[in-house]
Amino acid sequence: MKRSGGFSFHQTLTTSGEQATKCQMPRLEDHCWSCSCASRDETKHSSGANWLASKAEEMMSIITSVLSNAYGSLHDVRTANLIRRGLVLFTVGAFLALVLNLLQVQRNVTLFPEEVMTTLFSSAWWIPPCCGTGAAVVGLLYPCLDSHLGEPHKFKREWASVMRCIAVFVGINHASVKLDCNQVQLSLTLAALSLGLWWTFDRSRSGFGLGITTAILATVFTQLLVYNGVYQYTSPDFLYVRSWLPCIFFSGGVTVGNIGRQLAMGGVEKPHMD
């Protein structure tokens, strides 16, 4: 009886221990299963974040390349437009210098030495390139100065007004060699005509200031040329030149400035029309 009771007690303990073990095993498996699922979720989240980061980086690179290409094309367009305007202004300045210098040579206002190389219309070869370069610089500076000062020039912005301004400028040059009066009266008359040209076709502070600067610099440059014997003026009364010469340079600066402004406005408006 004791053996059977001990056997049954031992069997009972063994059975209860196995049952406890069986009861505990699912909990361990459940714990391991939950850990694997959590790691898989974290892997999925990390892979999704990496995919989003790679796509965002790709989109940023595409946007950067598009913006750089657009800026490069815009810069190329502006450069090409600037070159075209400069060439037009250079051509206009060279042509006006050639014609007006011919007029002064024929009226014996300016005299050139015989050894100086001459080209068409008995004009010194260096005058058209120098005047063309000056016209290009002044014509490009006028719209730049307007933009810098924040005062866009809107007074008579049309080609008909520009052509009338050119005609008045040529008339002032013609008057400088045609009027038969003393130098003081001629200088005052040309000064009044030059101011009238500015008031009629410009009326801007930037135009007046740049015209005065152009007149001063061009007059000083001409004084240096005459002083070095490159050419000379007959009957000089303002150091080595005529006293009305700054008036001619002032009106020429205003005229070239209006041409440059009109060319700049045309270059800006054309893309909007297309």
Image (cartoon, rainbow, N blue to C red):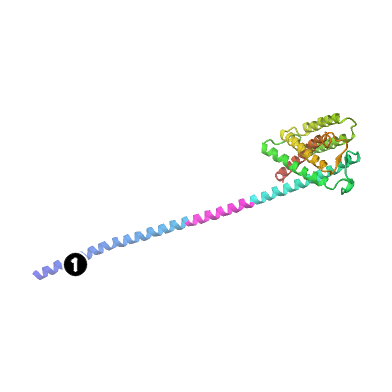
Tell me the residue at 74%/35% (across/down). 207
> Where residue 35 appears, x then y in whole percent?
35, 59
Nearer the observer, 130 or 227: 227
Tell me the residue at 28%/63% (across/down). 25
> In the current view of this chain or complex, which residue is farthest to the bottom?
3
Quadrant of the drawing holding the N terminus:
bottom left
Nearer the observer, 181 or 206: 181
Nearer the observer, 25 or 63: 63
- Is residue 158 visible in the rendered image? The answer is no
> Where residue 150 appears, x then y in whole percent?
67, 36
> Where residue 223 appears, x then y in whole percent?
80, 39
Magenta-drawn stretch, dominant element (helix, strand or loop): helix
Tell me the residue at 91%/40% (across/down). 106
Indicate left or right for 152 with 243 as reference.
left
Tell me, yes or no, whether the highlighted magenta stretch contains residue 140: no
Residue 243 placement: quadrant? top right
> In the current view of this chain or complex, which residue is farthest to the left?
1
- Tell me the kind of residue under disc 1: Thr
Task: Give the residues drawn in magenta, as a range.
Answer: 50-69
Tell me the residue at 25%/64% (across/down). 22
> Where residue 98 appears, x then y in whole percent?
85, 44
Q: Secondary structure at mark 1?
A: helix
Tell me, yes or no, whether the highlighted magenta stretch contains residue 61: yes
Indicate left or right for 36 with 67 as reference.
left
- Vertical position of residue 33 compared to residue 184: above or below: below
Residue identifier under label 1: 14
